[in-house]
Image (cartoon, rainbow, N blue to C red):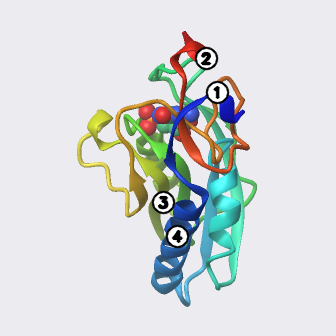
Amino acid sequence: MDNDILKVLISEEEIHKIVHRLGKEIEEDYRGKDLVVVGILRGSVVFMTDLIREIDLHLDIDFMDVSSYGDGMESTGIVKILKDLEESIKGRHVLIVEDIVDTGRTVKHLQGLLEYREAASIEVCTFLDKPTRREISGLEVKYVGTEVPNEFVVGYGLDFSQKYRNLPYVGILKPEIYE
Ligand code: 5GP
């Protein structure tokens, strides 16, 4: 897989530091609260499994699967719920975990949906953020691992056509892979 990567953007060591910092911030903010960490399948899985082990609190995990991208690289603008939560979130503190916030459409849609279910609070934690691509104004993302430039990135859960999710770092693909 390494041969398909043009450039490493975030190394394993950097990832570890980022995830540790986020975990400790979350631990501080949610002490004494009924926390449900909601991973958005499938991209957030690698990040989420590392993140929850940095949070020394009792918490529940749950997952939602939404589709906003097909096998391509452009947002379709359509967010479809493919798998819903297993548990009720009424009166509970929800932390949505995303791999990357790009246009912001996915997060915006999820926030609306979960607010309607009467969660006590809803915040978002994303590993990566591409602020220059944002199409939703005023979107609040409380916990951001790091910002990335407007490039299509893979690794650490992020895919291209379902591949590269298991790369232990984040990188940019060589153009010949997707052209
Ligand atoms: P948004 O709704 O914010 O435009 O899109 C969020 C989703 O788009 C992410 O969860 C991810 O699946 C996908 N996405 C956005 N940018 C990238 C990228 O650079 N690489 C990969 N692999 N997926 C991306």
Image location (x, y in percent) of residue 92: 57, 72
Q: Position of residue 106 (x, y in %)?
A: 47, 38
Quarter of the figure with residue 141: bottom left
Q: Are marks 2 and 4 in contact (CB under 8 Å)?
A: no
Picture mark count: 4
Q: Residue at x 69, y 44 (%)?
A: 167
For the residues carrying marks 3 and 4, which lies nearer the camera in this image?
A: 4
Task: Name the N-terminal-most of marks 2 and 4.
Answer: 4
Place of residue 168 in the rendered image (x, y in percent of width and height, measured from the top left): 67, 50
Question: Which percent across, then down, holds residue 149?
Answer: 35, 39
Give neighbour class at mark 2: few <14, some 14-19, many 20+ (Cα, 10 Å). few
Badge 1 is on which residue? Answer: 4
Callouts 3 and 2 close, C-beta under 8 Å: no
Real-space CA distance between mark 2 and mark 1, rounded to the nearest whole angstrom? 7 Å
Residue 137: mark in rendering: none
Q: Residue at x 57, y 64 (%)?
A: 13
Secondary element type, mark 2: helix
Give the label, 4 or 1, closer to the camera.
1
Q: Residue 125 — which label?
A: 3
Describe the element under mark 3 as helix, strand or loop: strand
Q: Amino acid at mark 1?
A: Asp
Tell me: 154 left or right of 50: left
Dot label at residue 177: 2
Q: CA distance from mark 4 to mark 1?
A: 25 Å
Residue situated in front as seen by the camera: 38 or 128: 128
How many residues crowd around disc 4 within 10 Å: few (fewer than 14), some, or many (20 or more)? few
